[in-house]
Image (spheres, rainbow, N blue to C red):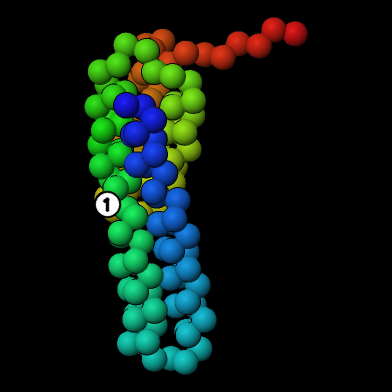
Amino acid sequence: MFVVCAALQLALLPALVLFAGAIAAAIQVLPSGDPERIAGEFSSGVVSSVMFVLPALVGVIVSWFMIRTSAQIPTWFARVTYLLSWCWLVYLPLGTLFGAIQLVLLRHARRQGRIATVRTTS
C-alpha cells in the first residue's frame, strides 16, 4: 500500500512542471500588455496541471491515513513523502495546507519512533 500511495503522490511532479510552464508562458506574453492573453496562458497551464493534482490529492490523503495508523513506516516512504510535502507547498492555498499537514504528521511519526532510521557504520 505504501508503494501505491507514493506512486499516486508522484503525479504531483508533472503537475509542477505544467504549473511552471504556465507561469513561464504568462511571463513571455507579459510585454504584450494584453491581460486576457496573459490570463489565458496561465489558466490553460493551471487547468492542465489539475489533471495530475487530483490523483496526487488522493495519494496525499491516503498517505495521511498510512502515517497516522501504521506501526512502522518504511524509511523510503518517509523520504519520498517528505520531499513531496515540500512540493505541495507550491499549490496555494490548499496545496500549502496539504503539504504542511503531511510535514507535521511525518515529524510526529519520527518523534514517536515509527519511522525506521537508517544507521550506517563506518
Q: Outermost residue, top direction?
A: 121
Q: Is residue 23 above or below residue 104?
A: below
CA neighbours of label 1 inside 10 A, class few (<14), some (14 to 19), many (20+): some
Which quarter of the picture shows residue 38? bottom left
Q: Residue at x 45, y 51 (%)?
A: 13
Q: Residue at x 39, y 91 (%)?
A: 34
Q: Residue at x 27, y 21 (%)?
A: 68
Q: Quadrant of the C terminus?
A: top right
Q: Outermost residue, right direction?
A: 122
Q: Nearer the viewer, residue 71 or 91?
A: 71
Name the residue carrying label 1: 54
Residue 32 placement, left or right of 72: right
- Residue 78, given in percent of the width and then of the height, sits at 44, 26
Residue 108 placement, left or right of 18: left
Q: What amino acid does circle 1 point to?
A: Leu
- Residue 45, given in percent of the width and then of the height, sits at 38, 70
Q: Residue at x 43, y 40 (%)?
A: 84
Asked if one can make out residue 110 in the rendered structure from this viewpoint, the answer is no
Residue 43 placement, left or right of 84: left
Which quarter of the picture shows residue 71? top left
Q: Which type of secondary structure does the marked residue at label 1 adopt? A: helix
Residue 60 placement, left or right of 78: left
